[in-house]
Image (cartoon, rainbow, N blue to C red):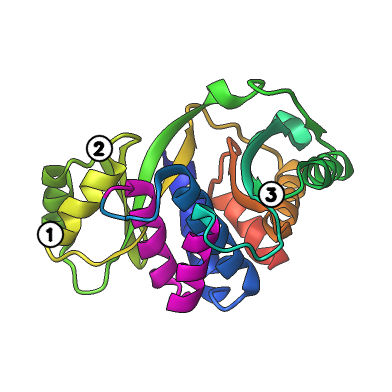
Amino acid sequence: MAGHSKWANIKHKKAKEDAKRAKVFTKHIRELTVAAREGGSDPDANPRLSLAIENAKAVNLPKDNIERAIKKGTGELDDGSGNYEEVTYEGYGPGGIAYFVEATSNNLNRTVGEIRHIFTKSGGNLGTDGSVAYLFEQKGSIKVNAEGLDEDEFMLTAIDAGAEDVNIEDDFFEVITSREQLFNVRKNLEENDINVESAELIRIPMTEISADPDTARKNLRMMDKFDDNDDVSNIFTNLKLDEETLGLLEEDS
């Protein structure tokens, strides 16, 4: 899980740096809309919506935007943008690195064309459904600001709350849960006065693949292209992010 943890750390830092970017707000608005459409507007009866609201608040999404997104999801408001649907794409990047891409789109033809273009232009190829999904395991990921928290005490609290594992990073702790227990673990942590920054479902590679510097750099650039796409909400890959690979990322930043 080490590689996932390092990539999570990179994404976490990038997210904090980019918190004011429109894409961050767009991602949360779409998640709120889909969550409300699937489970209703009551967060007490809709765990996914409850998580979406808390995550949106964590990036300072205005309350009015949150309320509008929920109303759009329940059909109370039509802003003319169409209905958003969740979709996933699977494929391979340079060097046979596996990619699982999650997106939310109101135009699936446009999105699949853009995703295919990124794969092809980056030296990879878009695969069929199921082509790489079996290489990843879905888990829950909860981010907690580490400031002021004792590492050992927090780990005990997290395990008692139902966590499967805890990754210790520079300025935050990442709590790993089973897919089914994400909401409950978050709730348990908050009841123990732990301030949760975000909680989401992720896909962890069961086996990571190392790459030579050139291949690693190509894949890192490919990840950035996916990240820049407005429809893409998450990118998961089995590229092994060792210290050498992370050094390439820093050189290109």
Give percent across and percent down for residue 188: 16, 52
Query: Which of disc 1 and disc 3 is earlier in sequence?
Result: 3
Give the extent of the magenta segment.
Answer: 45-72
Q: Is residue 53 magenta?
A: yes
Q: Which mark is residue 191?
A: 1
CB contact under 8 Å: marks 1 and 2: no
* The N terminus lies in quadrant: top left
Horizontal placement of 165 versus 24: left or right?
left
Mark 1 or 2, nearer chain start: 2
State the residue in front, 18 or 168.
18
**If you read the primary sequence from the N terminus, does the residue marked by circle 3 or circle 2 appear first?**
3
Measured in 3D between alpha carbons, the distance from the residue under mark 3 to the one under mark 1, in whole angstroms, is 35 Å
| Residue highlighted by disc 3 | 105
Residue 3 within the segment the image draws in magenta: no
Which mark is in front, 3 or 1? Answer: 3
* Badge 2 density bin: few <14, some 14–19, many ≥20, Cα 10 Å: some
Rendered-image quadrant of the C terminus: bottom right
Distance of label 1 from label 2 (alpha carbons): 18 Å
* Secondary element type, mark 1: helix
Task: Classify residue 144 as left or right of residue 191.
Answer: right
Magenta segment, prevailing SS (helix, strand or loop):
helix
Which label was assigned to residue 177?
none
- Give the residue furthest to the front: 76
Q: Secondary structure at mark 2?
A: loop
Using the numbered discs, state the Cα–Cα distance from disc 3 to disc 2 in whole angstroms. Answer: 32 Å
